[in-house]
Amino acid sequence: MKRIVLLGATGSIGRQAIEVIDGHPELELVAAASGSRSIDGVAPLTQVGGDLVELLERAEPDLVLNAVVGFAGLPATLWALEHGVDLALANKESLVAAGELALAAQRRGGGLLLPVDSEHSAAFQCLDGRASETVDSLVLTASGGPFRGRTREELHDVTPDEALAHPTWNMGPKITIDSATLANKGLELIEAHFLFGLSYERIEVVVHPTSVVHAFVRLRDGAALAHLGYPDMRVPISYALTYPERAATPIPSLDLASGLSLEFHAPDLETFPLLALARGAGEQGGTFPCVFNAANELAVAAFLEGRLPFLGIAEVVEETLAASDGASARDLDDLVEADASARELAERTLAPA
Ligand code: MG
């Protein structure tokens, strides 16, 4: 039996994870936590709100699935890595904000860090066991979101409802807005840098509207390996929870006879500046990725509340990055401070609605 703790049980990933766990007798959900919604009866030990680290200590898991949204997931990520408990990571923001601290904690703890993000799960599988000198580059695919192909002028007045209508993936509101702005791919770029130890110039993003290819790895001999599958998060969730066994799922395999559209093109960095801003923050290092994430979280919330126009999200992030010093964090306290002061700066750049 693998003892699993699920953090973020009522979100999109959390609900699909429960489905995966229910389908596998060797997986035991020993504890679950949600931010605010009731989860009575989901697991022997449940918690709504409160300190996730306390729950983890009580539950003694073999594996933690961290599906919390945003920076709030960071203490749980660091706890699992520090304690050598395998971590299935859907909370990309924690690795973006705390990349170096997280990797240092993992080296001390010695547990597995298994990405649940579909692109990273795909890349992890393509890279599996390959010597790093044989790998030229990694390509992450992006659906382009609901506003793919639009110009900046066409995005001035878009509403939260329009931004929440994702063409291929069914996800929670924060990541869906991040997909519409391409901030999600920016976060994933930084996430990939830390997960796979690749410099930023070796990670490319391409737009691929049907979301069938999740990632490519280009090798030095000219070959490229791709990972394909219908867009369904139960695949990477199941892969991470049952690693290295790769258990069966009810997801249909690709139907090639009915046709498959594999189209790729470069992202429009002018219309969607958050991707380039994330790359810049990642390359600058220090706490710039943490600042990028904090400003983006705050701006997305403001957009959903109707306090900020869609194009304002990138402006808030850009101004906050420009006003931050990005000094490196020595520990979690430093990061919490960097996150808080970035949110303060971001809040100040928001014009009153
Ligand atoms: Mg993803």
Image (cartoon, rainbow, N blue to C red):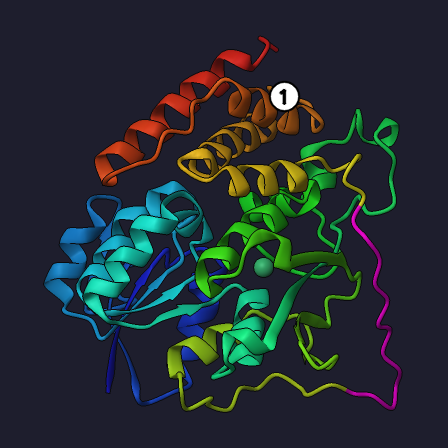
Q: Where in the figure is residue 98, as x and y percent of width and height?
A: 36, 46
How dense is the environment of label 1, judged by Cα within 10 Å: few (below 14), some, or many (20 and up)? Answer: some
Q: Quadrant of the N terminus?
A: bottom left
| Residue 186 is inside the magenta segment | no
Kindly identify the residue that appears in the image at 66 percent across and 42 percent down.
Answer: 275
Kindly identify the residue that appears in the image at 77 percent across and 48 percent down.
Answer: 146
User: Which quarter of the figure has residue 345?
Assistant: top left
Kindly identify the residue that appears in the image at 62 percent across and 51 percent down.
Answer: 185
Up-down relation of residue 201 to residue 297 (above or below): below
Disc 1: which residue: 308
Residues shaded magenta:
255-267
Residue 35 in sight here: no
Kindly identify the residue that appears in the image at 88 percent across and 86 percent down.
Answer: 258
- Residue type at the position of mark 1: Leu
Up-down relation of residue 146 to residue 315 (above or below): below
| Residue 256 is inside the magenta segment | yes
Q: Is residue 16 left or right of residue 278?
A: left
Q: Secondary structure at mark 1?
A: loop
Q: Which sits in the foreground, 11 or 269?
A: 269
Q: Residue furthest left?
A: 58
Q: Quadrant of the C terminus?
A: top right
Residue 101 in sight here: yes
